[in-house]
Structures are given as structure tokens and as C-alpha cells.
Image (cartoon, helix red, strand yellow):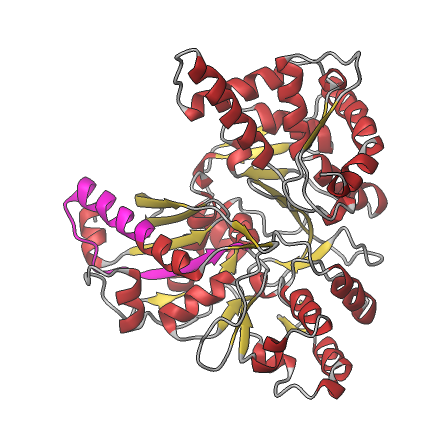
Amino acid sequence: MDCKEKLIGGSTSLGIEFGSTRIKAVLLSDDGVLLGAGNFDWENDLVDGIWTYPLYKVVRGMQAAFHALKEDVAAKYGVVLKKIGSIGISAMMHGYLAFDASDTLLVPFRTWRNTITGPAAEKLTKAFSFNIPQRWSIAHLEQAIMNGEPHVKNIAYITTLAGYIHYLLTGEKVLGVGDASGMFPIDSTKNDYYESMLAHFDAMHAEDAFPWKIRQILPKVLCAGENAGFLTASGAALLDPDGDLAQGVELCPPEGDAGTGMTATNSIGEKTGNVSAGTSVFAMIVLEKALSKVYTEIDMVTTPDGKPVAMVHCNNCTSDIDAYIKLFSQLLAQFGCKPKKSEIYDMLYANALCAEKDAGGVVSYNLFSGEPIINVEEGRPMLLRTPNAKFGFSNLCRSLVYSSFASLKLGMDILTEQENVSVEKLLGHGGLFKTKDVAQKLMASALGIPVAVMSSAAEGGAWGIAILAQYMRKKTAGESLCDYLNNRVFNSAEVTVAVPDAQDAAGFAAYMQRYEAGLTAARSSANVI
């Protein structure tokens, strides 16, 4: 069939991902052709000390992205999009969305970016003997209990952003196992929440006499390939207010951006890994065996099909680079120059590559928000240098790029040096890798691991969740997700690999010595301004 016939016949999969700065919708044919795409740009807001997105904007952004996709399809093929084969929803993992029995949001959406649950995360980590990061849903719930927040007694269910959108479209309170592993610890032998930890949590709060037990308010856990419901009439009207989209479309389990990133880079087999670098940065390593002990710097999550994964997550990555891009744009405008934003990014990255290997003594802290992995509670972006540092444009640029994965390096060292975890290569995706070669080359040297970029995953998480939706509908009996990806999706993918460079590695090591020495200033800066 040609593309037009595929669109009319519904031989397609739709993926929608709610990222930190963009909502993206992509439509794939069953043979992997990208038929259309649509975007909606948005930003989180800091309201009363909480990083949040209003839910009306969640819905409006989804509708705008889908409408843009429909327009793209109509312009290319002259087809009004009415029939879709399968749909998948993905979003930023973790955070806290709590609703009452009437589906009323009880408190504003608390995103992954908040670092307000330190006492709860520490308490639960000790209670479970399992690392509970601050951004996990259960940490937010426990902190709300510890704070005596009145809404807790009225909770009917909690979910993630992907789970919430999926519920709006299908009426099903379910979650993919990868996203669920950012709500509450997952037992990979059963692909469900740890029963012992559920019981422990309930026992901890027996005297609180809440009208719920923890399992009752968590989403049901599903694995990749399982049916997660169907698009209802109200869901179709919500997604497509034009009224063209037919109901009854099958949906796959909603997943987090980590799971879709693993899918989009074919990194769900043992000893594989990927690194996602955008507003935040995180590396996911699929483990051959359990870690020897609990590390607060390492999260234990899962692949979309339930394999255990060690995750190094950092809240901050490209936001500070973005801020400098705006500054450079304003400076150039003063001289009457108005280059495209993409051209300024390319200039910054190109200069980073030709700078001195250690950034000339210039050290940047890209801390727009708190960063638990380095014990920074509040965000204060900083630039430090000694009076005799070689402060030039290229060195500034390299410092900014180095800073975007400096915290990640500290967490990855635990896996590679202390736990001897084997990683053949990391597949890179996200905004940091859009300019060819630069961040890929520098990150490979910084982490001491080859970093690959795959051309077929250019659409990122939206592409990944579309593939998961396709897998649910197209898999054969007994065909694993790993086999499906290897044999049907990535069998002819083009991959470029950057290997560590000894001189760049030495330069980054020198940079990290200064970076770690300056962390005292980074931690105390919130007390100054």
C-alpha cells in the first residue's frame, strides 16, 4: 500500500509524548514510515515554590499537537485523518498527580523537577532498603503525609502525567511497568509492585486511618505488548475536537520518557544503555545482575517489558545552555544580526569542540533546579573562574557543555567503577545531540563509554511510544519486544559512534576536579541570593 492507502486504512500507529518543553505527536505507518508530526511548545512554571504545569494546558497542548499532525498529513497526502491503528501515550516520568473520587485534582501537579521530598525519600529508602528518589510519586505522597496536608485523606487515585492522559482517553487507570517503576518499586520477577513494600507502607500508616490502602490508589501495572484499553467516544472528542477521529482505537500501556527512550534507541537488552539529554539528563543501563547494595544516586526502574534497569537521573541538563543562547541572541540583535536559534546552537557547540580540553579553568553549574545527586537543594546557575582562567568564548562554550553532564558522570562512576557494570555503548538522544558530533564526542570521553546516535530515532520519545503501540498490535505469538525491535525496527538502522578520546578525557577529568571542589559554593548559593 502507498502512504495514502495506509492512512485511509488505519495501518498506522500514533505516538504522543509530553516532554519538558514540547508535546509531540508522530504518526508511523506499519512499515516504519513517518507519515506526519505535530508539536506544541510549553514550559513548566514555578508557582509558590512548586514546579508545575496546569492541566488545562496539558489538554490544550495535546489537542494542538494532534491538530498540527492532522494538518501535516492533509498537506502531504490530501487525507483527513480519521482512522488510526493504535495509540500510545508517553510523558515525563514520576511526579505527583492526586485525584479524588470525582476526578478533581487535589493539589497542583508536582513534577519530577521538584526537590521538596527529601525527608520522605530518606525515610522510605531506609524503610524499604530500596532507593526512593525525591521525584518518585510515593516520595511525594509520603511527604504530603509527613506535612499533614489535608488532601491526603481524600485521595481516590494517584498517577503520572502519562497515566492521567491515558485515563482521559480510555477511562482505564493503568500504567506501563516502566512508568510505574517511577511511582513505587517494581518486583521484576512479577512485573508488579513489591507486595512486601506495599504492606510495609500500609503498616507505617495504620494509625493514620486513611480510607485507602496504597495498592488501591496506584494504577494497575501492564507490560509492553498488552492491551491497555480503547479510545472512548469522549476520548476521541478530547483528542480531536474537530470530530474526525473514530473511537475504538486500541491503546498500549502508557509509558514514561525513560521507557520510550529505551525503545527509540533499541536499548532494552542486557548490557545495553541509553542516555537522554534535554531539560534533564539520565542514563539507563539494563542490568545482568542486581547491584550489590542500595545507592541513593542510582534509581532502580525497568524496561517497558520489565527488565531491571539502573538509572542515573539528573534534573538539570540543557536549561543553562538555552539561557546563554537567548543571551547571545540578544547580543547579536544589538548589532543588527538575527540568526536562527539553531544557528546559534551550532555556533556554541562548534566552539565547544575547538576549546581547550579543560575549558581553560572556567567552571559552570547548570543548576536551574535542585540536584539531589550532588546534594544541591535549590537551583542557582553559576559560572566560576579564577582571575587567571583563560576566559574566552570557546572555553565558556565547552564549560557549558561539560556542565550539562557533570552530575551524570558522578552517578555513572558508581556503576562502572564500583559495581563493574558492563556497558558496550550508550545510545544518545535528546536536544543535546541535535548538533552533530559535538556533545556525542565530549560525552563519550567524559564517561569513558562509546556514545552512539541512531538516525532512525530522530523523533525521540514520541517515536518510541508509537513503536510500542505498533508492537502491541503487530507482534506475533511469543515475539518479545527485544526480538521485535531487532528484527523489524532496527534491522537496517544507521548508527554513528563516537569513542572516548584520551586528551578530551584528561581535560574533562581536570574540569571535574574544579567542579567538585566548587560544589560547596553551589550548595550554599541559595542562602545568598
Residue for point 50% across, 27% down: 326
Residue 470 visible in the current orientation: no
Left or right placement of residue 396 versus residue 262 in this view: right
Q: Which residues are magenta?
A: 64-92
Let me know if residue 23 is in the magenta part.
no
Let me know if residue 80 is in the magenta part.
yes
Q: Quadrant of residue 56?
A: bottom left
Please, is residue 235 above or below residue 32 in the view? Answer: below
Residue 463 visible in the current orientation: yes
Q: Residue 321 location, x and y as percent?
A: 57, 30
Q: Nearer the viewer, residue 321 or 84?
A: 321
Q: Nearer the viewer, residue 423 or 50?
A: 50
Please, is residue 186 above or below residue 118 in the view? Answer: below
Left or right placement of residue 67 versus residue 128 in this view: left
Residue for point 61% across, 88% down: 211
Residue for point 48% across, 66% down: 163
Q: Residue 181 location, x and y as percent?
A: 63, 64
Q: How many marks?
A: 0
Residue for point 41% across, 59% down: 88
Residue furthest left in the image: 78
Q: Residue 392 location, x and y as percent?
A: 66, 12
In which quadrant is the C terminus drawn? top right
Q: Residue 212 location, x and y as percent?
A: 61, 85
Residue furthest front in the image: 529
Please, is residue 383 above or below residue 112 in the view? Answer: above
Left or right placement of residue 300 versus residue 26 in this view: right
